[in-house]
Amino acid sequence: MQKNSPGYKAFYILKKCYLKTTASVTTAPVKANDDSKIINWISGFSDPNARATTASVGDKLTFQWSGDHNVWMFATKAEFDSCDFSKASLVGGNSPVTHTMTQVPAYFACKITGHCAGGQKLAVTAATNPKDAAKVPRSAVVALTLFGIAFSVLLF
């Protein structure tokens, strides 16, 4: 491609726009002043794993971004899945936005045209309690105890 060709000029303009856009979204996150979970609000565009997290009622989520974005909370998962903001409520429009979880699950997205459909959304589901995860069901304890007794009898 020659430098004076229309294709080269278009490529050069697109490249400059891309570099300008990516430079504006690589800012360092602001440290929350409390025990908030930091949400990089623009990472969902490129990383599907960033579109889900876990939390408990009372936890704080701090959404951070650069550029033109906002945070809306949906009333239902169906509205979240279809990016239907008709019953959604505004959480905030200026970064950072901190939200204290009052219910789980909860669903958030950006209302700027095309952002929700492009992946700027977050589904928050219930966090498993580490203490509960470590609990062994009583039936397992009984089975292991009986196995231990039977094994001991067989050995002696």
Image (spheres, rainbow, N blue to C red):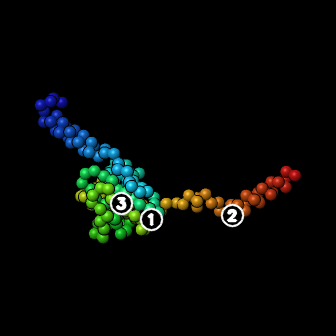
| Distance between mark 2 and mark 3 Cα atoms | 43 Å
Q: What residue type is labelled 3?
A: Thr
Q: Are marks 2 and 3 in contact (CB under 8 Å)?
A: no
Q: What residue type is labelled 2?
A: Ser
Label 3: few (<14), some (14–19) or many (≥20) C-alpha neighbours in 10 Å:
some
Residue for badge 2: 139
Label 2: few (<14), some (14–19) or many (≥20) C-alpha neighbours in 10 Å:
few
Side of 124 where 148 appears, left or right: right
Counting residues from the start of the chain, the first of labels 2 and 3 encountered is: 3
Vertical side of 117 occupied by 84: above or below:
below
In the figure, residue 12 lies in which quadrant?
A: top left
Question: Which label number is shown at residue 58?
Answer: 1
Q: Nearer the viewer, residue 154 or 129?
A: 129
Q: Do the residues labelled 1 and 2 touch (CB within 8 Å)?
A: no
> Residue, x 35% and y 56% (percent of image)?
63
Q: Nearer the viewer, residue 112 or 101?
A: 101
> Residue, x 28% and y 69% (percent of image)?
86
Residue 120 place in picture, x, y as percent: 32, 55
Side of 138 where 102 appears, left or right: left
Q: Which of 33 and 5 is in front in this view?
A: 33
